[in-house]
Image: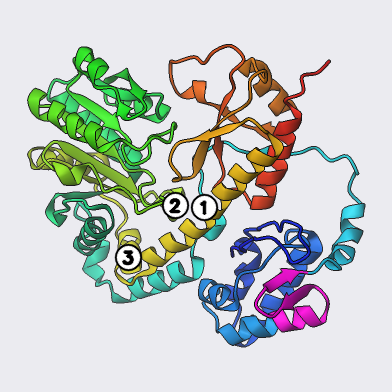
């Protein structure tokens, strides 16, 4: 469940709360009991404070679609809780948690200590797991289990189920501009396994070092190391991977995140993308494209994949870890034709293929339109949370700067001068119960003395928690006397 926040009629800024997990009983309740279950879940969410006064609830049509129930059932629940003073509504202004609901929730909150330790986790990398479409996924699971023949439950094709490869190829072609031949698409246990598979194949071809972005994801180094391949850091500039250092490194393969560089948030320029492919053609090299959050662009349509410009020089990887859940361990790899057979052989010896039923469920979810709906839902929520973060920083930390394109699940914030040194700031944040990551933790470059640059994950946080966390960070700017 996502509630969208705007300014309330009273002028106060409303918070936004993601509380899907509180409404799970509604999706699993018998049909005749769903109305009562929804009213109970909403009532308890208000009483417990999870839905704070001033929170705007989603439109009845949106919530009904999310829960898989009728719009009338949601409307009835809103009307009942409005009559009980838990909610308030106005013509054309939506439905909100009533200010008088504070009294209902206050009794329980008053039992807690007045001075409560702030605890907000801004560490990046995690989506909002409460947005996982449990009802739709359960329906796809039942459908897949009912239609699969007995033979499909045997050892699968190590490349993946044909229907999933067909569905993913169509999806990636349509949404990301990938040249996706289902015969060359390999279903993997996330981008982690795709990277490891590439490492083994490159090692078998005599390549012992792969270039990685600096700063970049530390996981790449560990994954390649497991295949006996070292990594060489290649610095970035404002357009993407710096090509002169890449050429000097002598590497024949390099890992990139061109749609939304992790962690800086830079989108590779068109000129840089073109020159990177030119480097690959001239050197006989390989560009590995980690498209970890390419669907989440908020200020414009997402930039198409690099692989679509030269599929014989780019290996494309992606997964459902940010759009659905990392625990599903479902991803894909599309490599140049010259590497496909080696990758399939390595995948066969590694695990004999991904679970057939999980693949069938994802195939049904994608082909039935559920995946597109999920992406739209996540885009709305994450765009709103990024806006909340940037507004909160502007309001509570004047002089701070947010860099990178409006995309993804994290942002880079540079704090005003005088807030460092970074190590001391990180210690003060930890002492205040605020978990943060410094940009310096992802690369070799070191900022000027006193400069503090944070990598702030926001997708997994309710907007009210984002604001609370930024307020707490703002207090850390005043050094202890």
* Mark 1 or mark 3: whose residue is earlier in sequence: 3
Q: Which residues are magenta?
A: 78-97
Q: Residue 102: x, y in percent?
A: 86, 63
Q: Residue 53: x, y in percent?
A: 78, 62
Q: Nearer the viewer, residue 10 or 76?
A: 10
Question: Is residue 16 at all visible to an observer of this figure?
Answer: yes
Quarter of the image where one finds residue 226: top left
Q: Nearer the viewer, mark 1 or mark 2?
A: 2
Badge 3: residue crowd in 10 Å (few <14, some 14–19, many ≥20): many
Whether 93 is among the magenta residues is yes
Q: Residue 147: x, y in percent?
A: 29, 76
Quarter of the image where one finds residue 267: top left
* Mark 3 or mark 2: whose residue is earlier in sequence: 2
Report the side of 462 relative to 45 (left or right).
left
Report the side of 57 relative to 285 (left or right).
right
On the image, numbered disc 3 is attached to which residue? Answer: 366
Q: Nearer the viewer, residue 228 or 232?
A: 232
On the image, numbered disc 2 is attached to which residue? Answer: 298
Report the side of 160 relative to 319 (left or right).
left
Q: Nearer the viewer, residue 477 or 36?
A: 477
Q: Residue 474: x, y in percent?
A: 72, 32
The quadrant the N terminus occupies is: bottom right
* Vertical position of residue 194 compared to residue 449: above or below: below
On the image, numbered disc 1 is attached to which residue? Answer: 382
Report the side of 363 relative to 111 (left or right).
left
Question: Residue at 66% of width from left, 58% of height from top?
Answer: 17
Question: Is residue 201 at all visible to an observer of this figure?
Answer: no
Q: Secondary structure at mark 1?
A: helix
Give the spatial CA distance, label 1 vs label 2.
9 Å
* Vertical position of residue 161 compared to residue 423: above or below: below
């Amino acid at each position: 469940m996502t509630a969208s926040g705007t300014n309330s009629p009273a002028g106060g800024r409303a918070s936004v709360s993601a509380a899907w997990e509180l409404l799970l009983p509604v999706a699993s309740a018998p049909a005749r009991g769903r109305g009562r279950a929804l009213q109970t879940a909403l009532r308890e969410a208000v009483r417990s404070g999870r839905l704070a006064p001033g929170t705007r609830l989603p439109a009845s049509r949106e919530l009904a679609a999310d829960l898989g129930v009728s719009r009338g059932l949601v409307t009835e629940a809103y009307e009942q809780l409005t009559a009980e003073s838990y909610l308030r509504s106005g013509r054309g202004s939506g439905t909100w948690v009533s200010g008088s609901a504070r009294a209902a929730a206050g009794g329980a909150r008053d039992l807690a200590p007045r001075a409560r330790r702030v605890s907000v986790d801004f560490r990046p990398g995690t989506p909002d797991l409460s947005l996982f479409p449990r009802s739709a996924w359960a329906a796809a699971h039942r459908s897949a289990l009912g239609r699969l023949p007995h033979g499909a439950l045997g050892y699968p094709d190590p490349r993946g189920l044909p229907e999933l490869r067909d569905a993913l190829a169509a999806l990636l072609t349509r949404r990301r501009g990938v040249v996706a031949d289902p015969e060359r698409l390999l279903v993997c246990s996330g981008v982690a396994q795709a990277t490891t598979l590439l490492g083994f194949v490159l090692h078998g071809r005599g390549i012992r070092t792969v270039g990685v972005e600096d700063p970049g994801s530390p996981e790449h180094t560990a994954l390649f190391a497991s295949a006996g391949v070292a990594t060489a850091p290649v610095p970035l500039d404002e357009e993407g991977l710096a090509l002169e250092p890449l050429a000097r490194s002598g590497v024949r393969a390099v890992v990139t995140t061109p749609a939304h560089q992790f962690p800086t948030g830079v989108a590779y320029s068109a000129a840089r993308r073109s020159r990177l492919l030119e480097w690959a053609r001239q050197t006989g090299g390989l560009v590995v494209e980690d498209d970890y959050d390419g669907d989440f662009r908020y200020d414009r349509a997402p930039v198409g994949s690099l692989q679509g410009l030269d599929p014989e020089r780019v290996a494309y990887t992606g997964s459902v870890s940010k759009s659905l859940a990392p625990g599903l361990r479902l991803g894909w790899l599309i490599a140049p034709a010259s590497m496909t057979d080696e990758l399939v052989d390595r995948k066969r010896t590694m695990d004999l293929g991904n679970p057939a039923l999980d693949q069938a469920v994802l195939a049904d979810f994608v082909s039935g339109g559920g995946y597109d709906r999920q992406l739209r839902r996540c885009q709305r929520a994450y765009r709103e949370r990024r806006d909340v973060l940037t507004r909160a920083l502007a309001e509570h930390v004047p002089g701070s700067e947010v860099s990178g394109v409006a995309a993804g699940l994290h942002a880079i914030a540079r704090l005003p001068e005088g807030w460092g040194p970074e190590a001391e700031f990180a210690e003060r944040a930890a002492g205040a119960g605020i978990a943060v990551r410094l940009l310096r933790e992802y690369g070799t470059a070191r900022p000027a003395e006193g400069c503090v640059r944070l990598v702030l994950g926001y997708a997994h946080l309710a907007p009210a928690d984002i604001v609370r966390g930024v307020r707490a960070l703002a207090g850390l700017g005043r050094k202890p006397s």
